[in-house]
Amino acid sequence: MGRPAFFRRRILTQAASLEAKGLFNYLVSEIRTRREVPLEEAVLAARDVLEYLERNLLTRTPGQIVFPAISGRENHQKRSRANQPEKLISLTVVAEEDIELMAEFGTVALQRGRLARLVEEAYAQDAILDTPRLCVLFPQTHRGIRAILQSFWQQGVLLPVAGMKKENRQLMRNLRAALAIDRYLSGEDLTALRKDLAISTGRWQ
């Protein structure tokens, strides 16, 4: 019992350290200090401020990079790099929700949530990624990345990448957010549901 408890405490300490260095936590602290409001109100105000900054003032949000992806959502066919139409997209390689996932569910959930979010961000910008590109963004092998994606595909999550087999494309039904709401309204336990789909508290809210 001692070792799991020790590793759990270490993960929580690491997550708290990361949170303290983030822009969101800084905004919460400043709002609480300057406005003398409760923590709950400061969190809500900080989310609004951060969303405004990201949408209106920042060309790239904290933790975001510009990355070459394959242009078009339906380019599932595996092709040589020379025959792939490319476009530059913005990807958030590090986000506040990653820290929340690590603190609540551990590093495995952190990796799963980051991978799903990056694929979804590419899809929202009319582009998709492939396994070699994902290997640049993750300290994982091709097999490890495919195993994570397969765990989502088998739940019906829409996470398209280039080079997918036809049977995996047929498994995908809807976006992660839509499936999460459907399953929650069907009566599933919220915590277990968020763990299965790697959804942080902040994203759920």
Image: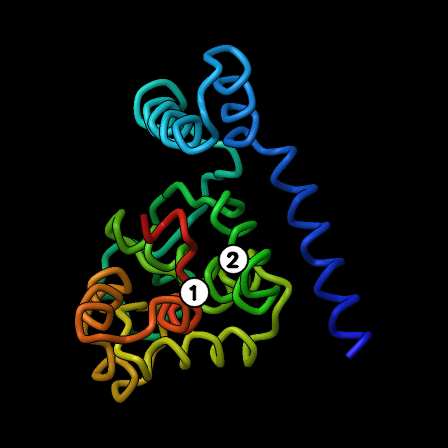
Crowding near the residue tagged with mark 2, few <14, some 14–19, many ≥20 C-alpha atoms within 10 Å: many
Residue 174 appears left or right of 205: left
Q: Residue 73: give x, y in percent of width and height.
A: 23, 60
Of the residues under marks 2 and 1, which one precedes in the sequence?
2
Residue with the most extreme bottom position: 167
Residue with the most extreme top position: 34
Q: Nearer the viewer, residue 7 or 108?
A: 7
Question: Disc 2 on helix, strand or loop?
Answer: helix
Q: Which residue is mark 2?
A: 101
Q: Nearer the viewer, residue 61 or 190?
A: 190
Instruction: Tell me the quarter of the picture where residue 40 sits.
Output: top left
Instruction: Tell me the quarter of the picture where residue 18 sits.
Output: top right
Q: Residue at x 73, y 59 (%)?
A: 9
Q: Which residue is mark 1?
A: 198
Q: Nearer the viewer, residue 139 or 38?
A: 38
Contact between marks 2 and 1 (CB within 8 A): the answer is yes
Residue 69 appears left or right of 178: right
Amino acid under disc 2: Leu
Residue 161 appears left or right of 96: left
The quarter of the rendered structure image containing the N terminus is: bottom right
Q: Residue at x 34, y 63 (%)?
A: 83
Crowding near the residue tagged with mark 1, few <14, some 14–19, many ≥20 C-alpha atoms within 10 Å: many
Q: Residue 145: give x, y in percent of width and height.
A: 51, 73
Amino acid under disc 1: Ala
Residue 16 appears left or right of 109: right
Question: Disc 1 on helix, strand or loop?
Answer: loop
Q: Residue 189: give x, y in percent of width and height.
A: 33, 73
